[in-house]
Structure formats: structure tokens, C-alpha cells
Image (cartoon, helix red, strand yellow):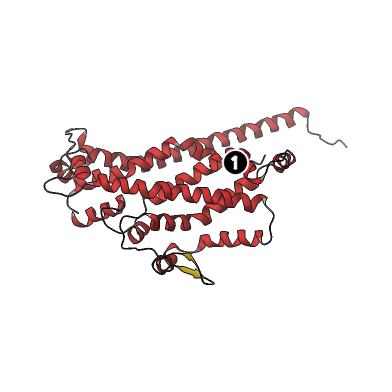
Amino acid sequence: MTTATPTVGTGVQATTTTTRVSRVRKRLNSRTATLVSIVIALLWTVPTFGLFISSFRPEDQIKTTGWWTFFSDPQFTLQNYQDVLFGSSSSSGQLASYFINSLAITIPSVLFPTAFAALAAYALAWINFKGRDWLYIAIFALQIVPLQMALVPLLKFFSTGVTVAGVQVLPAWDLVDEQKFAQVWFAHTCFALPFAVFLLHNFIAQLPSDLMEAARVDGATHPKIFRTIVLPLITPALAAFGIFQFLWVWNDLLVALIFAGGGNETAPLTVRLAEMAGTRGNEWQRLTAGAFVSIVVPLIVFLSLQRYFVRGLLAGSVKG
């Protein structure tokens, strides 16, 4: 009685076939992912491109035809932007001053939480003190608190101040004073800190312990370690959070309307756009121009910091 045994050639052929099938699957998956990415990019880009084209079209054209007819009958004007930025005899756009207000609100509202969160994240990751883990858990839990639930208590703190054991921790602020941005800076900083500390802590905690120990052996203190070692290594993470925070604050309407007010001196760009949409719902040419003005700065910030944003997202995916 004889028993059939597989030949070496058969085993090699089966292995080769399996390898080819695996390569084909990888190519198909890669092509599918590329196709899906292209479709998503078009879905995001086409409306923005249409908004850009519409912002330069005359009033009679934008009200009677679609933006795609611009290519068959191109008509170009800068009157929409002139009316929106500087106003006109029939409108009171003047978004230029609101644009400056948005910058005055957004830039400090990004810098403050980034600086405070970086310091707090380093302390929670590399400084041993009693209750550190519970404090981190409490900060992590604050992320699930809805922003709307904190508006009324925060307004009360601003209006009456905070006193602990007879010591005034937070003075009462005059919310009627429209010359101050401190209230909205404070509010945005408070709302951003839980997520910022959580995000930066994950990056800082993954830094090699040998690097920290070597620095301590050389006599480096915590401030020096943070300044010379940690900050350069977490720059991508700081940039990633900075982009998130910038886009959030720049596009915010609720917090700015409550804490900054609706006056010309402190109201951001989003407040003015909401007013234009409510009072001039039929003047599409001004709304398109105003909307495109509001997205120019976020686009510039995102495109200029895109490489840091990608590095920040991928920095924690591979350890070491």
C-alpha cells in the first residue's frame, strides 16, 4: 500500500498563489481607499469652490442662476466684498472691525489653554505627588460635561465673583463693559483645558523614561526639562491641538455672543454673519462674500500647519 505525499513544487505553487491573492487584495483595498478619499475630497471642495465663485458674481446673476453658469457667462465684480468689508450706502456690513475682534478673541484663546495644558500635562505625567491619578481622572471626566451646563455658573462667577474661606479668588467683572475680552478668553480657556490636558498628557507620558532620568542625573530641574526636552518633542501635538482650538474658537457663536456681547467693540465675525443672515436673507451676494471671508483665516491656518497636524496625529501611534 502506497501513500501519496505532496511534492515540494505543489507547496511552493500554493504559497505563490496565496501571495498573489494577498497582493491583489491589497491593491484593491488601496484603490478603494483612494477612490473614497477622492469622493470625500470632492464633496468637501465643490461647495467651497461654488461659494468662492458666487462671492464674485453680480447681484442679478447670483439671484437668478446657479454658480456653475459662471463658466458659460463669466461676470466678475468686487462690489460684494467692498459692501461686506467696508459697508455701502444700502448696507452696514463693515466686517473688517468684526474680523479684528475675532482675531483678538481667537489668538489668546488658543495660546492660554495650550500653555496651561502643556504645564499641567507634564506635571501629571512626570511629577509624582499625592492624588495625581485621581486628579487626572477628574480632568478626563470633565470632557463629558456639556458646555451649555457651565454657562450659567460661569456667568454667575463673572458677575458676583468667587470667595473661598473669606478670600476673593475671582473678582467680580463688569459684563456691561464692552471694551474687555477677558471674559471670553477665560471661558474658552476653561472649556478647552480638559481636552487639551488629556491630549497632551498622552504624548508627554510616552516620552522615553531614560531621557528624563538622564536629564535628572545631569542636574536638570523640572522647568529645564520641560523647556529644553519636552517642548521640542511635543511640538506636533501642540500644533494639532492649536488647530483644533483655533477652528473651534473662530467658528464659535454661542460663547462669544454670551460673554463678549453683540456690540461692535467686542463681537466676533460669527455674530455679524448671524445678523446678516437674519436681516438680509435675500441678499445672497453679501452672505456668500461674508461667509468666504470668515473661512479664509481657518483655511490659511490649517494649510500652513498641516504637516504639524499630521505629525501630531501620528506621533502617538508608534511607541519609541
Residue 12, given in percent of the width and then of the height, sits at 72, 29
The one of 267 and 253 positioned closer to us in this rendering: 267
The one of 158 and 242 positioned closer to us in this rendering: 158
Residue 205, given in percent of the width and then of the height, sits at 64, 48
Residue 23, given in percent of the width and then of the height, sits at 60, 33
Q: Quick check: 197 left or right of 149?
A: right
Q: Is residue 34 above or below residue 282?
A: above
Quadrant (top left, top right, bottom left, bottom right) of the N terminus: top right
Q: What residue appears at the point 61 percent right and 38 percent down from the top-left corner? A: 228
- The extreme top residue here reads 9
Q: Quadrant of residue 227?
A: top right
Q: What residue appears at the point 49 percent right and 70 percent down from the top-left corner? A: 163
- The extreme right residue here reads 1
Q: Quick check: 112 left or right of 173?
A: right
Q: Amino acid at mark 1?
A: Arg
- Badge count: 1
Q: Is residue 28 above or below residue 63?
A: above
- The extreme left residue here reads 89
Q: Secondary structure at mark 1?
A: helix
Q: Quick check: 200 left or right of 276?
A: right
Q: Is residue 61 above or below residue 149?
A: above
Residue 313, given in percent of the width and then of the height, sits at 54, 43
The one of 34 and 182 positioned closer to us in this rendering: 182
Q: Residues within 10 Å of mark 1 (few under 14, many from 20)?
A: few
Q: Quadrant of residue 7?
A: top right
- The extreme bottom residue here reads 165
Disc 1 target residue: 227
Q: What residue appears at the point 54 percent right and 51 percent down from the top-left corner? A: 117
The one of 52 and 138 positioned closer to us in this rendering: 138
Quadrant (top left, top right, bottom left, bottom right) of the C terminus: top right
